[in-house]
Image (spheres, coloured by chain):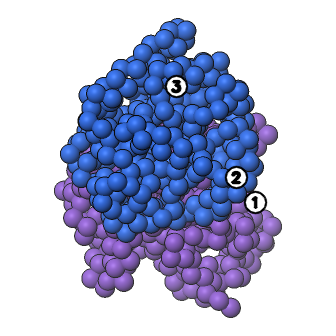
């Protein structure tokens, strides 16, 4: 069983919703990333999402774009990210790692080489924001050969036929984009998200994660009541940005924020775990 | 011989094009595709478009024989397709009229656009004013400084111009920001892309609207010379004026096509925007195409004297035409373009845009190679008034 499947199974038994923090690799400095990932796990993260910085992050808001710019200033590349993750895996063999980014850096490396190196670095799943399933067949084949999960997005604008298409194509989990907008936007409608997730669950037994616009413990707790995973990106990265000049503090204050989210989510009603609701 | 029929149903030109966007935009793009497929076959829509091109843009634009220039250059007969005479001074309006009509048919009341030099922004603001639509234009803050007059023109036309502070603060960042706006306001907003790039159906749709250039030029040259030209020459940034000229000639295999890219300060300096000449295939702004990028797949900042060619990508159909060798792509430096700017101004009394000056500079080389019996059509895609400041600055003149 893949690390992602195993983690979701454990959480389901515990009736808990997964907490997935997102950080951009190499932000604000290369040395911060690995200790920060360990600290996030200690403070309650169940899965880690690592952003691969890209010069033109069209689906991201200003907070994550600035993180990418900080990381690219010291030339963070896929090769360097794989080295970081290999180091992380020396001490943590169980926490699933998901890479999130854009297609072009992967194209340049080549799908096969990318998948091989990702697998060797201990990556479990990859979410490529600008690669819809229609264009993803070759990529998915390379991923499957390395037993890596290809995670796809669903959005408020996805109609029934696309929900089916993506449910059939995805593995690991499905990432539901909770709003019409970019990462870190503030117009999340929890009721609308809940209704859409119900619709998606009729089509898939895969776990459903929710992200884009979840910035506070309160909203995280509300979403945890019906999602299998909550992804918190911009709110985490914003705290990193505020402490960019004093990176040592990042290792204390960002995990403290994760612990806060974790507590709020655990106090919420148990998650409606995947495959249970029809 | 099989007639050219690209893109295919999924929006591919061979290996290029396609749809590479986040899930939120997949359904809106499908709606646009369906609406456009219906409209492009609709006689009433086509009549509406053609009427606007005639009555509002002032088409057909002349195909002008540049006699003195041809003699001066001592080679082929140079014809200029005068897109500079269109309303707003460039070819851009052919496309914004078309897309604004599609927007109206789809019931969208708000249009957005990205702009580099400001020409596409002005063309969008113009049609928005005419159709009574709300208009927001994204423009890199660097470009806003360089093109202050166009910013003011857009504001006079009632558009809101939003400065983009991210990345290199130029065209590619404005495009990112416009995409973000579209993702956020997808239900009531139509995104008017200014070139033959972006996700399907944009490259095809923009080409179709711009191909009025080549259709007219083909009919005009047949009337004037009773034969097809030997070569077509057009500048390529994103590539919309070039696709517009090339497309109606694409099955005329004997007509050579030259796309002229901006070589900036020279290929060896790295300060250029010659995507097809120096780039590699990759994925950006919704399509697979040639890009200027680092070894790690990060997009590179480009340089050109002409803001309209200052783009690290290129329309996917050009990538296909390059690989299939149907068209050839060459490059011209800032310096060569500037020379051509002065030569046309002084010999014909026509002041070309710096973008179009790149096409002219290459036509000069080609004219000598081809000799006096051959015919070259150069797309004079825009007028040079907007560039007077740039030219004056380079010559150390202050107003």
**Quadrant in the picture for residue A256:** top left
Left or right: residue B305 versus residue A121 is left
Label 2 secondary element: loop
Q: Residues within 10 Å of mark 1 (few under 14, many from 20)?
A: few
State whether residue A120 is above or below residue B41.
above
Residues packed near mark 3 inside 10 Å, few (<14), some (14 to 19) or many (20 plus): many
Report in which chain the residue with disc 3 lies.
A
In the image as oriented, which residue stretches furthest toward the front? A13
Which is nearer the eye, B97 or A209? A209
Q: Are marks 2 and 1 on the same chain?
A: no
**On the image, numbered disc 1 is attached to which residue?**
B365
- Chain letter for purple? B
User: In what element is the residue under mark 3?
Assistant: helix
Q: Which mark is residue A41?
A: 3
Left or right, A219 with respect to B74, comes to: left
N-terminal of the pair, mark 2 or mark 3, is 3
Q: Which chain is blue?
A: A
Q: Residue A210 location, x and y as percent?
A: 37, 43
- As helix, strand or loop, the secondary structure at mark 1 comes to helix
Q: Residue furthest bottom?
A: B1
x then y, percent, for residue B343: 63, 52
Chain for numbered disc 2: A
Q: Which residue is mark 2?
A: A146
Residue B324, x across and y down, in percent: 72, 72
């Amino acid at each position: 069983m893949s690390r992602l499947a195993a983690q979701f199974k454990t959480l389901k038994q515990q009736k808990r919703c997964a907490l997935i923090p997102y950080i951009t690799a190499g932000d604000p400095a290369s040395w911060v990333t690995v200790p920060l990932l360990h600290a996030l796990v200690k403070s309650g993260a169940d899965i880690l999402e690592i952003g691969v910085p890209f010069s033109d992050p069209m689906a991201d808001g200003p907070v994550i774009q600035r993180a990418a710019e900080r990381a690219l200033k010291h030339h963070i590349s896929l090769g360097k990210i794989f080295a970081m993750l290999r180091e992380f895996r020396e001490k943590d063999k169980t926490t699933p790692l998901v890479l999130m980014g854009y297609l072009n850096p992967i194209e340049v490396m080549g799908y096969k080489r990318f998948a091989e190196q990702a697998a060797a670095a201990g990556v479990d799943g990859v979410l490529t924001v600008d690669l819809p399933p229609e264009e993803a067949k070759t990529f998915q084949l390379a991923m499957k050969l390395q037993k890596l999960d290809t995670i796809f997005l669903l959005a408020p604008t996805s109609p029934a036929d696309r929900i089916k298409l993506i449910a059939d194509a995805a593995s690991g989990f499905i990432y539901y984009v909770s709003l019409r907008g970019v990462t870190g936007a503030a117009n999340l409608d929890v009721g609308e998200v809940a209704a859409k997730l119900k619709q998606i669950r009729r089509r898939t037994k895969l776990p459903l994660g929710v992200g884009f616009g979840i910035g506070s413990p309160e909203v995280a707790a509300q979403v945890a009541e019906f999602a299998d995973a909550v992804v918190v990106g911009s709110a985490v990265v914003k705290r990193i940005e505020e402490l960019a000049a004093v990176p040592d503090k990042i290792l204390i204050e960002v995990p403290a924020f994760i612990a806060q989210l974790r507590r709020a989510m655990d106090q919420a009603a148990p998650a409606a775990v995947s495959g249970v609701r029809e | 011989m099989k007639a050219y029929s690209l893109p295919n149903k999924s929006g591919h030109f061979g290996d290029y094009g396609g749809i590479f966007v986040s899930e939120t935009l997949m359904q809106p793009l499908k709606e646009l595709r369906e609406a456009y497929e219906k409209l492009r076959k609709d006689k009433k829509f086509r009549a509406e478009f053609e009427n606007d091109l005639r009555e509002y843009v002032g088409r057909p634009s002349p195909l002008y024989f540049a006699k003195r220039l041809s003699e001066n250059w001592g080679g082929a007969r140079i014809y200029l397709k005068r897109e500079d005479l269109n309303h707003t001074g460039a070819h851009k309006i052919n496309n914004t009229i078309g897309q604004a009509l599609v927007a109206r048919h789809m019931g969208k009341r708000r249009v957005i656009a990205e702009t580099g030099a400001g020409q596409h922004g002005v063309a969008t603001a113009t049609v928005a004013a005419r159709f009574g639509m709300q208009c927001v234009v994204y423009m890199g803050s660097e470009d806003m400084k360089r093109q202050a007059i166009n910013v003011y023109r857009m504001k006079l036309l009632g558009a809101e111009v939003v400065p983009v502070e991210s990345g290199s603060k130029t065209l590619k960042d404005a495009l990112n920001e416009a995409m973000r706006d579209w993702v956020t306001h997808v239900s009531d907003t139509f995104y008017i892309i200014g070139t033959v790039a972006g996700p399907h159906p944009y490259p095809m749709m923009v080409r179709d609207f711009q191909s009025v250039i080549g259709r007219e030029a083909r009919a005009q040259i047949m009337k004037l010379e009773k034969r097809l030209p030997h070569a077509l020459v057009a500048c390529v940034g994103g590539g919309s004026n070039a696709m517009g000229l090339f497309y109606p000639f694409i099955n005329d295999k004997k007509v050579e096509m030259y796309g002229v890219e901006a070589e900036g300060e020279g290929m060896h300096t790295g300060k250029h925007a010659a995507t097809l000449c120096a780039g590699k295939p990759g994925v950006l702004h919704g399509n697979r195409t040639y890009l200027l990028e680092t070894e790690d797949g990060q997009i590179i900042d480009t340089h050109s004297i002409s803001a309209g060619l200052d783009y690290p990508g290129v329309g996917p159909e050009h990538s296909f035409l390059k690989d299939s060798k149907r068209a050839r792509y060459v490059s011209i430096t800032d310096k060569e373009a500037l020379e051509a700017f002065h030569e046309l101004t002084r010999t014909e009394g026509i002041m070309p845009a710096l973008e179009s000056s790149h096409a002219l500079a290459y036509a000069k080389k080609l004219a000598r190679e081809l000799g006096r019996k051959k015919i070259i059509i150069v797309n004079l895609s825009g007028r040079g008034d907007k560039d007077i400041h740039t030219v004056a600055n380079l010559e150390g003149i202050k107003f």
